[in-house]
Image (spheres, helix red, strand yellow):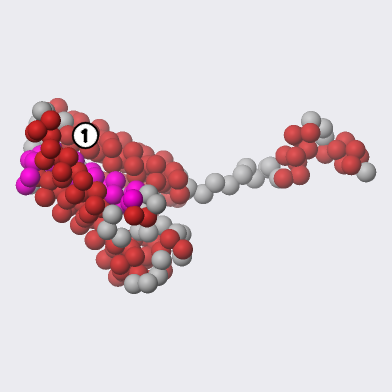
Amino acid sequence: MTSVAALPVLGVAALGYVVGMLPSAEIVAAGLDPRGAGSGNPGAVNITGLLGKRAGATVFGMDMGKAVVAGQVGRAVAGGPGANVAACAAVLGHCFPANRGFRGGKGVAASFGQMLATFPAYLPVDIALGIVATKSDFWKAKPVATIGVTCALWTLLAAVWTKHRLPNAWAPAAGCSMPAAAAVASAAIIYRFAAEAPRTPPADVDEGSSNNRGLGCSEDDCAASKE
């Protein structure tokens, strides 16, 4: 791709990022800062817990719509590559909004929008995996691993679709930009999940015992040395 031909793609990437920065959760919350309430995540799940299912569904739809709109505009301007780049940029704008200190949502709803606009053949698979994960205590306890598996499958199948030129419903024909965009969006989503994952010390380690081990003595010896 020449530098001149790349300009439309760069343009829709910038547009997609700006669209992705739209603070859906804050708009729906109407004065309540979701970053300072509930889980602190400006996304549909937190809004559901704070304001109910209807508000949560609205946020989910808005976040999903951001990537859909970006992808459609990108396709109109720069074809398949434009659709993939713009939709992916919307996910990045949602996860890392410059106007919010680069701390945004986790990108799940926005990624659904990216799939709907660029890889609808995979979307039912992703939804099915999500349903299975919510029914499994094992996967619910490991959200980072769960999202990692689904993102890896998204990227892998996008590559398979591209290699074999498989049908892609109403979206642009599968091309190299599709797995690349899936990989970039996946990396952003996994990063956001990992960043928000709770970090707790091992259950068998307490402050006193860890300090004693740092001194290189047993608990009894350390207690005696302090007397």
Relative depth, front residue between 6 and 28: 6
Magenta residues span: 76-98
Quadrant the C terminus occupies = top right
The location of residue 226, given as percent across then percent down, is 89, 42
Residue 30's place in the image compared with 113, above or below, is below
Q: Is residue 81 left or right of residue 64?
A: left
Q: Can residue 106 be seen in this view?
A: no
The location of residue 177, given as percent across then percent down, is 17, 34
SS under mark 1: helix
Dominant secondary structure of the residues highlighted in magenta in the image:
helix
Q: Is residue 19 left or right of residue 205?
A: left
When asked about the image quadrant of residue 165, the answer is top left
Quadrant the N terminus occupies = top left
Query: What residue is shown at x 7% (from left), y 45% (from top)?
Result: 77
Residue 86's place in the image compared with 134, above or below, is above
Query: What residue is shown at x 27% (from left), y 58% (from top)?
Result: 22
Q: Is residue 27 visible?
A: yes
Relative depth, front residue between 158 and 20: 20
Provide the residue designation for mark 1. Answer: 179
Callout 1, which amino acid?
Pro
Query: What residue is shown at x 76% (from left), y 44% (from top)?
Result: 208
